[in-house]
Image: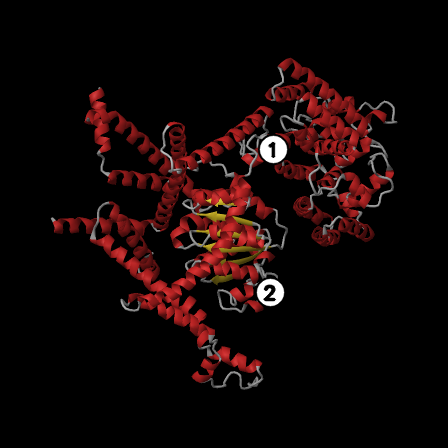
């Protein structure tokens, strides 16, 4: 019996990695095709992010810096979509800027989707009055510093070429400090780290952030230190936020797939270790 | 369907699916289809990057500043008065004019950019160091401030924690002394005593003494509360408040308010309704305190704490009975900095000789009424709203520094008055939300929690619920606040009441966690101390350090795995957006791979 087990474990150790890839694909695809709806609890950091928005009085200006590109779309686009719907239905004024060249199309897509929602449609929001997309600007931290001093000179035109001086909403938003809340959606550098270190303390921003899972460990210290009021990390963070605002989207749908993927990895790690330690003596 | 199949959209969907699967095919083995997709991706990205670089960076930031566009030159000429409005659109602008209107300083940056190209020259490559030096110098300047102001100082500040848990303890005790006077109802005497005894045991007091002290302290609390709130000196004969509450809990009694009585205040707090409709669960330990009742207790305690004698007595209790260090006791009792006391607020409101607020004084009630009752959410009160009262309220709250709140309030009240009776009901929700968000935010920002509690006393139970959630969550050591902050939920997904035992456990975990972080940081630092051989104690420490480092790397790696799986999920979600196309592309790719492998064989 033991010999049989050892042989099986040895074969497991020599398993072709392509079987693992195939299993992983199955683990991901199956819950997407047959939704299971595993429950999950929003993280306190995401709750605080949600609360920071909820606490804003109607008509407050929120600056959203979308610093990501299609590479981070699965993790961050669901957050951005839920964020805009949340901000719009709370009747907050939204100014969007991007430090990543690939972000403006994603922002436009998310705004358009939010405006299509029934609860937002009835509000009759107007471009340039209730929201504006300033588009992309190159320059990383220099742009952040420029925005801290004067957004009008840093972004002379909006994404569609309208001079900022002619945008009604921008008359209330002349520098970073004029926003009641700053939201950073970050897929890398420049992103949350740069915004926190360059602008948050210097211009006294009330800041929350959503970032990719890879970046989350780097950003958690900022949240713990109070530099970020809230933080949503990865697809889980986006799903948490979707749940809190009551708009389940692609991140929520992906949570079961994510859980199964994690379970598979954990199982392989555990089995691999067991197999390794049990067959170690045999090899010797 | 057929039309769609032959549309550009379908072609796009097929190419998307096919390209995605070609990239995935590398997981099977390296193959020409993967290479093709990879090269296409690199080529498209590079092309996109170059176009972007030109249109987003080089042209607007350099070229347009050296040679301004025709329109920009016309604008400048127009502003200088050299161009009439009629000629504006058709005025010819020569290249020389455009060059003359350029910003010459940008030639310096152009030169620096050109110098970078000398990197490829063997003889003159040293010239490329000049622009590099400029870039490095500029960024170093930015980074130094950034690192100090944005990372070093705030992060250092955040690490200066009290690892003993004393801070949590003080907050917990401070909150407890606000909640404990709910014992005036006498309904949870045993739980309270147990709670106190538990705390004292945790502080090292033996159990018999702790139980006795708990009883004594509770009795003292009740006595003092009764004194302060004036319950013992009610002139109305036959009113035994504790008994009344007990009867109300059983649905046998109804508390009727009369002018000038403490009961009137309670009735007002309950929205003017009979109190037996509210379940009086005065247990601060299981967090089922009715919001208005909790707030009432808070207000009463605050009044008591404003009395120097009351504070002294409680401080003495903390120091002698609970064996808390004097500094801790003082901290627990201290008014948060910047928060005006209730008495100060009354003084600011020009109340005559109101050093000790007295709820039975008509003037006190008038103040509260003028501040609050007319903006109470009760429709009857709202209907009575008058512009003179609004003006009075505006004036008074302006004195408290709540400008934005007032503007919003004023607008809402006017809109509310304009509504007919059916619409009032609909507006109520929005009004409640406004009060919750506006009042809580503004007053919290102003740190006028005392005023907030006074407001809460005079508002309806629904409003109080909202206030209560906010308040409780603000105090993490308070059970409900703790639950909110830590996301403790029951099966239905609602924030569940947390027992005192669970709070204690949570606090213990927090303290242990803080200590672990301290040990981990110190051990990690010792691991990187290479000036001495890692033997003996240092060897053990460095081993602990490496263990912590491995754990932190593992945690980071967990996040990385999560991120990668998320990306895979995203790709699969994209593929499943067109399931038939994805299926077709998969079949085509598999056939192609098979044919390719046969060709190779």
**Residue B429 in the figure: left or right of residue B304:** left
Residue at 52% x, 59% y is: A145
Q: Do the residues under discs 2 and 1 have CB atoms within 8 angstroms?
A: no
Q: Residues within 10 Å of mark 2 (few under 14, many from 20)?
A: some
Q: Is residue B370 left or right of residue B291?
A: right
Residue B27's x, y, as percent? 26, 45
The residue positioned farthest toward the front in the image shown? B532
Closer to viewer: mark 2 or mark 1: 1
**Which mark identifies residue B167?**
1
Image mark 1: chain: B
Residue A47 in view of the camera: no
Which residue is more in the foreground, A114 or A282?
A282
Real-space CA distance between mark 2 and mark 1, rounded to the nearest whole angstrom: 48 Å
Quadrant holding the N terminus of chain A: top left
Check disc 2 and report the residue beneath it: A168
Question: Label 2 marks which chain's residue?
Answer: A
Percent across and percent down for residue B69 are 46, 77
Q: Is residue A155 above or below residue B386?
A: below
Q: Nearer the viewer, residue B59 or B395?
A: B59
Quadrant of res B84: bottom right
Q: What SS does tag 1 mark? A: helix
Task: Give residue B131's position: percent from left, percent from top.
Answer: 39, 65
Quadrant placement of the C terminus of chain A? top left
What residue is rendered at 32% in x and 55% in y?
Answer: B16
Depicted B106 relative to depicted B198: above or below: below
- Asked which secondary structure carries label 2, the reply is helix
Q: Is residue B483 visible?
A: yes
Q: Quadrant of residue B291?
A: top right
Residue sitting nearer the eye, B5 or A249 = A249
The crowd level at tag 1 (other Cα within 10 Å; few <14, some 14-19, many 20+) is: some
Residue B389 drawn above or below residue B507? below
């Amino acid at each position: 019996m033991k010999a049989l087990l050892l042989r099986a474990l040895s074969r497991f150790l020599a398993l072709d990695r392509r079987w693992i890839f195939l299993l992983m694909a199955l683990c991901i695809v199956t819950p997407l095709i047959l939704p299971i709806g595993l429950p999950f609890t929003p993280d306190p950091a995401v709750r605080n992010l949600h609360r920071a928005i909820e606490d804003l009085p109607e008509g407050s200006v929120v600056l959203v810096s979308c610093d990501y590109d299609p590479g981070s779309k699965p993790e961050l686009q669901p957050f951005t979509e839920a964020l805009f719907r949340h901000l719009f239905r709370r009747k907050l004024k939204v100014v969007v800027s991007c430090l990543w060249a690939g972000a403006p199309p994603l922002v436009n897509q998310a705004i358009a989707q939010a405006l299509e929602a029934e609860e937002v449609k009835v509000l009759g929001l107007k471009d340039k009055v209730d929201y504006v997309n300033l588009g992309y600007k190159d320059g990383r931290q220099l742009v952040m510093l420029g925005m801290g001093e004067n957004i009008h000179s840093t972004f002379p035109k909006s994404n569609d070429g309208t001079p900022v001086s002619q945008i009604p909403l921008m008359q209330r938003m002349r520098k970073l400090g004029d926003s009641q809340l700053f939201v950073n959606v970050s897929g890398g550098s420049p992103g949350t780290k740069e915004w926190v270190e360059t602008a948050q303390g210097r211009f006294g921003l009330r800041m929350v952030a959503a970032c990719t899972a890879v970046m989350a460990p780097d950003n958690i210290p900022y949240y713990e230190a109070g530099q970020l009021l809230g933080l949503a990390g990865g697809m889980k963070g986006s799903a948490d936020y979707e749940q809190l605002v009551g708009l389940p989207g692609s991140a929520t749908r992906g949570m079961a797939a994510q859980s199964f993927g994690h379970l598979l990895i954990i199982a392989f790690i555990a089995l691999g270790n067991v197999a390794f330690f049990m067959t170690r003596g045999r090899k010797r | 369907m057929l039309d769609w199949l032959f549309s550009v959209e379908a072609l796009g969907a097929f190419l998307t699916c096919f390209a995605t699967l070609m990239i995935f095919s590398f997981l099977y083995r390296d193959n020409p289809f993967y290479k093709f997709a990879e090269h296409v991706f690199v080529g498209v990205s590079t092309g996109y990057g170059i176009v972007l670089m030109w249109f987003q960076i080089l042209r607007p930031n350099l070229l347009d500043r050296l040679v301004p566009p025709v329109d920009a030159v016309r604008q400048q000429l127009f502003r200088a008065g050299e161009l009439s409005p009629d000629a504006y659109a058709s005025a010819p602008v020569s290249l020389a004019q455009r060059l003359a209107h350029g910003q010459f300083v940008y030639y310096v940056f152009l030169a620096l950019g050109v110098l970078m190209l000398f990197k490829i020259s063997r003889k003159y490559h040293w010239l490329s160091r000049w622009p590099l030096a400029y870039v490095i110098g500029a960024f170093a300047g930015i980074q130094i401030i950034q690192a100090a102001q944005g990372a070093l100082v705030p992060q250092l500040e955040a690490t200066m924690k009290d690892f003993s848990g004393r801070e949590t303890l003080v907050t917990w005790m401070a909150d407890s002394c606000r909640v404990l006077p709910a014992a005036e109802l006498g309904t949870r005497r045993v739980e309270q005593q147990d709670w106190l005894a538990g705390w004292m045991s945790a502080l090292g007091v033996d159990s018999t003494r702790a139980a006795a002290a708990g009883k004594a302290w509770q009795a003292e609390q009740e006595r003092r509360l009764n004194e302060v709130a004036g319950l013992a000196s009610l002139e109305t004969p036959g009113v035994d408040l504790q008994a009344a509450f007990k009867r109300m809990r059983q649905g046998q009694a109804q508390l009727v308010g009369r002018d000038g009585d403490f009961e009137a205040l309670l009735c007002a707090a309950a929205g003017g309704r009979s109190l037996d409709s509210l379940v009086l669960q005065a247990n601060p330990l299981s967090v089922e305190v009715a919001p208005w009742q909790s707030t009432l207790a808070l207000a009463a305690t605050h009044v008591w704490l404003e009395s120097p004698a009351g504070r002294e007595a409680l401080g003495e209790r903390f120091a002698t009975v609970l064996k808390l260090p004097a500094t801790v006791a003082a901290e627990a009792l201290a008014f948060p900095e910047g928060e005006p006391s209730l008495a100060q607020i009354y003084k600011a409101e020009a109340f005559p000789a109101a050093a000790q607020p007295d709820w039975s004084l008509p003037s006190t009630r008038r103040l509260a009424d003028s501040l609050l009752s007319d903006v109470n959410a009760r429709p009857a009160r709202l209907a009575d709203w008058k512009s003179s009262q609004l003006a009075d309220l505006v004036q008074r709250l302006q004195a408290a520094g709540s400008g934005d709140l007032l503007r919003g309030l004023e607008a809402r009240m006017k809109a509310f008055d304009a509504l007919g009776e059916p619409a009032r009901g609909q507006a109520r929700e929005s009004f409640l939300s406004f009060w919750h968000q506006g009042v809580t935010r503004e007053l919290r920002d102003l740190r006028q929690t005392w005023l907030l509690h006074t407001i809460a006393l005079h508002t309806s139970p629904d409003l109080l619920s909202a206030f209560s959630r906010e308040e409780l969550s603000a105090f993490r050591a308070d059970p409900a606040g703790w639950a909110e902050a830590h996301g403790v939920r029951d099966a239905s997904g609602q924030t569940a009441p947390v027992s005192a035992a669970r709070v204690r456990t949570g606090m213990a975990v927090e303290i242990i966690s803080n200590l672990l972080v301290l040990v981990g940081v110190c051990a990690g630092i010792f691991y990187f101390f290479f000036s001495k051989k890692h033997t003996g104690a240092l060897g053990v420490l460095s081993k602990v350090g490496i263990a912590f480092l491995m754990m932190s790397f593992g945690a980071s790696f967990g996040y990385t795995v999560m991120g990668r799986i998320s990306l895979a999920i995203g790709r699969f979600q994209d593929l499943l957006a067109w399931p038939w196309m994805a299926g077709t592309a998969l079949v085509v790719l598999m056939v192609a791979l098979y044919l390719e492998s046969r060709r190779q064989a």
